[in-house]
Amino acid sequence: MTKLYLIRHGIAADRADYSNDEDRPLTEKGKQKTEQVAKCLHKKGVKFDLILTSPLVRAKATAEILSQEGLGKKIAEFAPLAPAGDIENWVNWWSKWEYNKDDSSLALVGHQPDLGNWSELFVWGRTEEKLIVKKAGVIGIRILDKDKPIGNCELFLLTSPKWLL
Amino acid sequence: MTKLYLIRHGIAADRADYSNDEDRPLTEKGKQKTEQVAKCLHKKGVKFDLILTSPLVRAKATAEILSQEGLGKKIAEFAPLAPAGDIENWVNWWSKWEYNKDDSSLALVGHQPDLGNWSELFVWGRTEEKLIVKKAGVIGIRILDKDKPIGNCELFLLTSPKWLL
């Protein structure tokens, strides 16, 4: 069964301290919590064939922690995972991905409200911003029709770090 | 913030062994896993003002475990939580409940696909059976408008026991 894990970046430095929002790094607490979440996922047997990440610093740092904790060796930056990215770009990418098959596992590391919106699009085909996705939170989605994923998925996990740690 | 926790009963005895489906008890494994889930919720600070349960044996046993593990002292049977129950009966009950206020916490113990359907109704106002709710799994919902809960909630948790234990 093809599984998607949408993972929000960890706690990042204050906006006020960075002239460019894209440069904000994870805080120490953000790194720690993200590591704990990654260790938990690893313990539960989660493995990613690929970790796609938003190109922003706080997302890339989150993706690197996931990889360092043994969840997957391959990381790739994916511009549509930046804030306000279009899921159709992902769908195009997905249709050509070499691991697009029944037992693949893919992580998407990015931002809110986009990850919640994408999740609602995957599962219900429309978005109402009704999913609460905390920093370093995880959404688990099962793709039922890999040729037409939008609206053809099920939700099996939505959690903030609180419940995993 | 008013919170609802919809909790599916634990693993129950085989249908083949009981002439009446309603009488099926939890198995030993079902009790153990439900206890572990309850302990985890307790550790995370969850408390229920009331535990409403389906009148079926496997649901009542689940509700009793939640109570024994310190999650709430009050349990009440609620017929609309039996399979195929109508959420409108719950809405009527809710409008008159003494703890219906901004910081209440309520558990609903029941069955699939009803708990997933009710959750979709709470959050999106319609149901497509897109939530995967395993035995002893937990759904967490935040009610935004307590006078009109259907379609006016957010989802903050969906998990099987696997991720909590």
Image: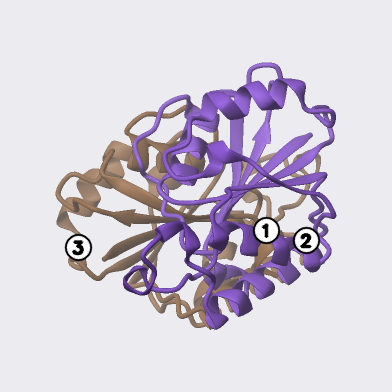
Chain colours: A brown, B purple
Where's the N terminus of chain A, which quadrant?
Answer: bottom left
The residue that disc 2 covers is B67
Q: Which residue is drawn at the image coordinates 38% and 52% (left, top)?
A: A78
Q: Is residue A116 visible?
A: yes
For label 1, the residue is: B63
Nearest-to-viewer mark from 3 and 1: 1
- Chain letter for mark 3, please: A
Place of residue B91 in the rendered image (x, y in percent of width and height, measured from the top left): 62, 24
Residue A121 image point, x, y percent = 36, 36
Secondary structure state at the residue bearing disc 1: helix
Callout 2: residue from which chain? B
Q: Residues within 10 Å of mark 1 (few under 14, many from 20)?
A: many
Alpha-carbon span between mark 3 and mark 2: 45 Å
For the residues marked 1 and 2, what is the alpha-carbon distance in whole angstroms?
Answer: 6 Å
Q: In which quadrant of the rendered view does residue A57 lie?
A: bottom right
Q: Are marks 3 and 2 on the same chain?
A: no
Amino acid type at mark 2: Ser
Q: Inspect the image, locate mark 1, and give the three-letter code of the amino acid beneath it.
A: Ala
Q: Determine whether label 1 and label 2 are within 8 Å by CB.
A: yes
Q: Nearer the viewer, residue A156 or B21?
A: B21
Question: In the displayed structure, would residue B32 be above or below residue B46?
Answer: below
Q: Which of B26 and A104 lies nearest the eye of the viewer?
A: B26
- Residue A30 in view in this figure: no
Q: Residue at x 58, y 63 (%)?
A: A62
Asked which quadrant contains residue B90, the reply is: top right
Q: In the visual, does B73 lie left or right of A102?
A: right
In percent of width and height, residue A131 lies at: 55, 39
Q: Amino acid at mark 3?
A: Asn
Q: Nearer the viewer, mark 3 or mark 2?
A: 2
Q: CA distance from mark 3 to mark 1?
A: 42 Å
Residue at (65% x, 49% y) in the render: A134
